[in-house]
Image (spheres, rainbow, N blue to C red):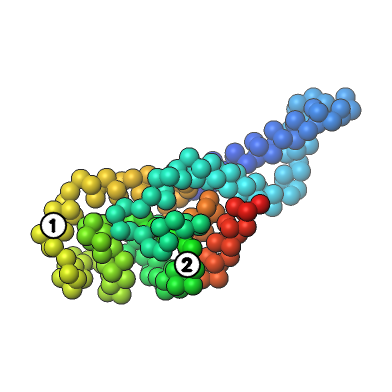
């Protein structure tokens, strides 16, 4: 229901933008008196929209892209600053790929080898992982454990082992933690601590700010957003686009 309401708002917004733009164009174009009144202009634009409804999705997409770009610019520093060791690659990379992820997300799991390959192939890339546990209690347990492991410099090891273990639950998370060389007493403190809780709340807020429909995986590459398991080639192309844009 919430997504439907958001879509309805987006459609109305897009229609208003189109009508408004049409009104402005007619006002500035010196149109004939027959169509100079606002009501006449709105009727003309309305008729055009009804005859060409395909422009509405395009308008919505452009509207969302502008919103996302603005939110990214305002949130760039917080977005690209990793929590402890929840990052990999070049610490001063010329491109930063941010991945919003959930351990219960099958598409996130299938994206693990794609990100690993990007890191292996691209020495100038920096990857930052942001945990957004939105798929149930197992997600939250695993996210907290991953951040506790990150505080001991072991985020990526936990990340890979947890995804390999399958959909998370308390037993699987404990088994992964025990398989690692960690101070488990400190892990327990951190799992229950405010620093980890604050990081998760912040990640959820960041994701919502950039796009109001939370989804995993979501990749953000210098402002460009890709949703879902888009694959190695799409991610590589987005990285190349980011580099080209930075040089232009």
Q: Which residue is mark 2?
A: 123
What element does badge 2 sit on? loop
Numbered mark located on residue 186 in the image? 1
Q: Residue at x 20, y 45 (%)?
A: 194
The location of residue 183, given as percent across then percent down, is 13, 63
The location of residue 33, given as percent across then percent down, is 88, 24
Q: Please name whichever residue, 66 or 11, is drawn nearer the observer in this view of the structure.
A: 66
How many residues crowd mark 1 within 10 Å: few (<14), some (14–19), many (20+)? Answer: some
What's the distance in space between the residues labelled 2 and 1, CA to CA? 33 Å
Locate residue 211 relative to residue 105 in the image: left or right. Answer: right
Q: Residue at x 49, y 63 (%)?
A: 124
Locate residue 190 relative to residue 107 in the image: left or right. Answer: left
Q: Residue at x 35, y 53 (%)?
A: 82
Count numbered badges in the picture.
Answer: 2
Residue 17 to residue 1: above or below: above
Residue 114 to residue 101: above or below: below
- Say whether residue 97 is visible: no
The location of residue 76, given as percent across then percent down, is 46, 45
The location of residue 237, given as percent across then percent down, is 58, 65
Q: Residue at x 27, y 45 (%)?
A: 198
């Amino acid at each position: 229901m919430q997504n439907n309401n958001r879509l309805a708002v987006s459609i109305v917004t897009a229609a208003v933008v189109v009508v408004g733009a049409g009104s402005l164009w007619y006002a500035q174009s010196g149109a004939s008196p027959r169509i100079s009144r606002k009501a006449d202009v709105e009727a003309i634009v309305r008729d055009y929209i009804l005859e060409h409804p395909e422009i509405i999705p395009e308008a919505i997409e452009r509207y969302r892209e502008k919103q996302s770009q603005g939110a990214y610019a305002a949130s760039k520093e917080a977005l690209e600053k990793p929590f402890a060791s929840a990052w990999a690659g070049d610490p001063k990379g010329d491109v930063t790929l941010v991945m919003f992820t959930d351990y219960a997300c099958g598409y996130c799991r299938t994206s693990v080898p794609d990100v690993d390959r990007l890191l292996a192939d691209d020495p100038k890339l920096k990857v930052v992982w942001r945990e957004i546990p939105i798929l149930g209690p197992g997600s939250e347990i695993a996210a907290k454990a991953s951040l506790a492991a990150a505080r001991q410099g072991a985020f990526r090891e936990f990340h890979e082992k947890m995804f390999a273990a399958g959909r998370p639950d308390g037993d699987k998370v404990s088994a992964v933690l025990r398989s690692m060389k960690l101070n488990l007493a400190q892990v327990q403190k951190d799992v229950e601590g405010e620093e980890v809780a604050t990081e998760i709340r912040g990640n959820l807020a960041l994701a919502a700010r950039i796009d109001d429909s939370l989804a995993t995986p979501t990749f953000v590459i210098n402002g460009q957003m890709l949703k879902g398991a888009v694959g190695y080639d799409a991610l590589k192309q987005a990285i190349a686009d980011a580099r080209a844009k930075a040089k232009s």
